[in-house]
């Protein structure tokens, strides 16, 4: 198990399988790499199937428990099912997708071993949906979500990025998850750091307040102090669950961040909000392992006062980081492959 200098264990990786996407959501941060490319653009820098599997295998050796496959749009890769099928035993595999290609492939993905799916859905109205995603695939997404539920992937999490362009649709999405069994809603605070347009941000506390009033019951989870709002449907015979993911300026969020990211072109990234990437070379097992060690050793929380000035020098803020955990360096030999 790798642990960073702030005591955060590495338990999860997000692997971007491509930076191509058939949507062009106005808010998209593309995993911190800037704009996505169109779906037809050449894919020469994308990790090969074998390279992705090698990364997963090294991660599993390092006790990483879960992988989330993402993009761009990961379903543009035809080897997605193969990657899911050949992922290391015991590693939980989930997928974040725009859902537009899910209808025909949900069954096959479940057969291959997919355990969970997040589908972006920012509106329940086709016109608003088209405006936000710059695509006309609303019906396909709805079919995709239904297919995922039919294939047994419940709970299916709907991801909604809350910003100026979507805030008015929150009540409708909340109603939808209350009415439909198997759906959950994640309201994700808009992160302006990479997507630009800070003026699009909305006050997420107001969303919490609105939910607290609307909810029939509220649970607080220990991790991140995160709340779960349960909303009864109109007939009172079911309920939907809504969570708010609010990382912006949230020191607890970064303190509980246990993930690194793999870019579509084979680099490791220790934090979504930091531009720094660490190429994994030709992607031999030894190079991948060395990169994991270095990137984890280098990880620093993004939100929070983890460094303070003392006598003109920058030092760790012990109040924020607690006791320092020493990262164990394991040397990598060239013949370690
Ligand atoms: N702010 C917050 N979340 C974002 N996502 C993409 N861009 C942003 C952003 N600027 C999230 C969406 C999408 C997932 C892949 O990343 O929820 O579903
Ligand atoms: Fe996000 Fe904070 Fe983790 Fe960076 S350190 S990826 S900002 S949660």
Image (cartoon, rainbow, N blue to C red):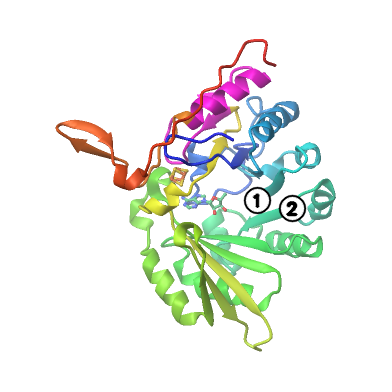
Instruction: Give the position of the N terminus as an image quadrant.
Output: top right
Q: Residue at x 78, y 57 (%)?
A: 103
Q: Residue at x 43, y 48 (%)?
A: 255
In screen coordinates, is 240 left or right of 276? right
Q: Residue furthest bottom?
A: 235
Instruction: Give the position of the C terminus as an image quadrant.
Output: top right
The boundaries of the magenta stretch are 267-296
Q: Are marks 2 and 1 in contact (CB under 8 Å)?
A: no
In screen coordinates, is 208 left or right of 185? left
How far across and down, in percent of the image, does residue 38 sit? 60, 39
Q: Residue at x 50, y 29 (%)?
A: 295
Question: Residue 295 colored magenta?
Answer: yes
Question: Residue 321 colored magenta?
Answer: no
Residue position marked by numbered label 2 in the rendering: 115
Looking at the image, which is closer to me, 61 or 160? 61
| Residue 277 visible in the snapshot | no
Q: Residues within 10 Å of mark 2 (few under 14, many from 20)?
A: some
Q: Residues within 10 Å of mark 1 (few under 14, many from 20)?
A: many
Q: Residue at x 48, y 42 (%)?
A: 8
Identify the secondary structure beneath mark 1: strand
In screen coordinates, is 82 left or right of 251? right
Q: Is residue 205 above or below residue 188?
A: below
Disc assigned to residue 97: 1
How far across and down, in percent of the image, does residue 192 sit? 39, 49
CA–CA distance between discs 2 and 1?
Answer: 14 Å
| Residue 183 visible in the snapshot | yes
């Amino acid at each position: 198990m790798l642990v960073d200098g702030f005591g955060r264990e590495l338990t999860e990786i997000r692997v971007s399988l491509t930076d191509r996407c058939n949507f062009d959501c106005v808010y998209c941060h593309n995993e911190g790499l800037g704009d996505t490319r169109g779906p037809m653009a050449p894919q020469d820098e994308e990790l090969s199937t074998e390279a992705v599997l090698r990364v997963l295998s090294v991660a599993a050796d390092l006790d990483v428990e879960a992988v989330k496959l993402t993009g761009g749009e990961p379903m543009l890769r035809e080897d997605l099912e193969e990657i899911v099928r050949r992922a290391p035993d015991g590693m939980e595999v989930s997928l974040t997708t725009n859902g537009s290609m899910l209808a025909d492939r949900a069954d096959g993905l479940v057969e291959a071993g997919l355990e969970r799916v997040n589908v972006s859905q920012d509106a329940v109205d086709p016109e608003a949906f088209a405006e936000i995603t710059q695509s006309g695939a609303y019906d396909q997404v709805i079919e995709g979500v239904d297919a995922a539920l039919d294939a047994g992937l419940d709970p299916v999490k709907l991801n909604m990025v809350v910003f100026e362009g979507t805030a008015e649709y929150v009540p409708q999405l909340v109603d939808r998850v209350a009415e439909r069994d198997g759906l959950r809603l994640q309201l994700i605070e808009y992160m302006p750091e990479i997507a630009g347009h800070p003026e699009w941000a909305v006050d997420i506390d107001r969303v919490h307040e609105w939910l607290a009033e609307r909810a029939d019951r509220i649970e607080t989870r220990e991790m991140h102090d995160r709340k779960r709002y349960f909303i009864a449907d109109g007939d009172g015979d079911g309920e939907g669950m809504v969570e708010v993911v609010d990382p912006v300026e949230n020191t607890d969020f970064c303190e509980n961040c246990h993930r690194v990211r793999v870019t579509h072109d084979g680099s490791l990234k220790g934090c979504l909000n930091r531009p720094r990437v660490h190429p994994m070379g030709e992607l031999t097992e030894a190079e991948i392992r060395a990169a994991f060690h270095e990137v984890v050793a280098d990880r620093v929380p993004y939100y929070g006062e983890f460094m303070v000035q003392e006598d003109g020098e920058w030092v760790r803020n012990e109040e924020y980081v607690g006791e320092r955990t020493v990262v164990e360096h394991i040397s990598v030999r060239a013949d370690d492959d």
